[in-house]
Image (tube, helix red, strand yellow):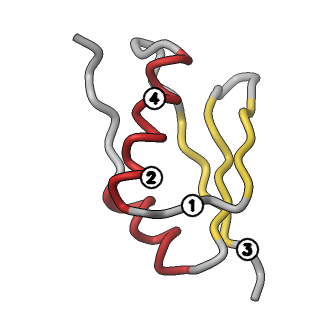
Amino acid sequence: MPLRTVFLLKPSKISFAESMSQLRTWFDHKKIQPTWFRLREGEQTGFEISFQSDADASAFDTEFAWQAAA
């Protein structure tokens, strides 16, 4: 089964460390483990995240939302 990759744009108001923390918290809460995770920098800084199952990728793509840093 091919991997399903999702691109997630990192909001400029959230630090890199905070964004990584929020992603890890979400993955842990949902008990989802990505198979591949990569930072993509350039015009659009964000994360390329691959999942083994379409269900995990769909859950991430539709449920994950950035939280504003306090």
Q: Quadrant of the N terminus?
A: bottom right
Q: Amino acid at mark 2?
A: Phe
**In which image quadrant can residue 18 be found?**
top left
The x, y position of residue 21, in whole percent, is: 45, 29
Q: CA distance from mark 2 to mark 3?
A: 17 Å
**In which image quadrant can residue 6 be found?**
bottom right
Q: Are marks 2 and 1 in contact (CB under 8 Å)?
A: yes
Q: Nearer the viewer, residue 48 or 35?
A: 35
Q: Which residue reaches farthest left?
A: 70
Q: CA distance from mark 4 to mark 3?
A: 24 Å
Disc 1 element: loop
Q: Which mark sits nearer the N-terminus, 4 or 2?
A: 4
The x, y position of residue 54, in whole percent, is: 55, 80
Q: Residue at x 36, y 61 (%)?
A: 30
Q: CA distance from mark 2 to mark 1?
A: 6 Å
Q: Which residue is identified by label 4? A: 21
Q: Which residue is identified by label 1? A: 33
Q: CA distance from mark 4 to mark 2?
A: 10 Å
Q: Which mark sits nearer the N-terminus, 1 or 4?
A: 4
Q: Which mark sits nearer the N-terminus, 4 or 3?
A: 3
The x, y position of residue 53, in whole percent, is: 59, 79
| Residue 27: numbered disc | 2
Q: Is residue 24 above or below residue 32?
A: above
Q: CA distance from mark 3 to mark 1?
A: 13 Å
Q: Amino acid at mark 3?
A: Leu
Q: Are marks 2 and 3 in contact (CB under 8 Å)?
A: no
Q: Callout 3 environment at 10 Å: few (<14), some (14 to 19), or many (20+)? A: some
Relative horizontal placement of residue 60, taking residue 8 as reference (left or right): left
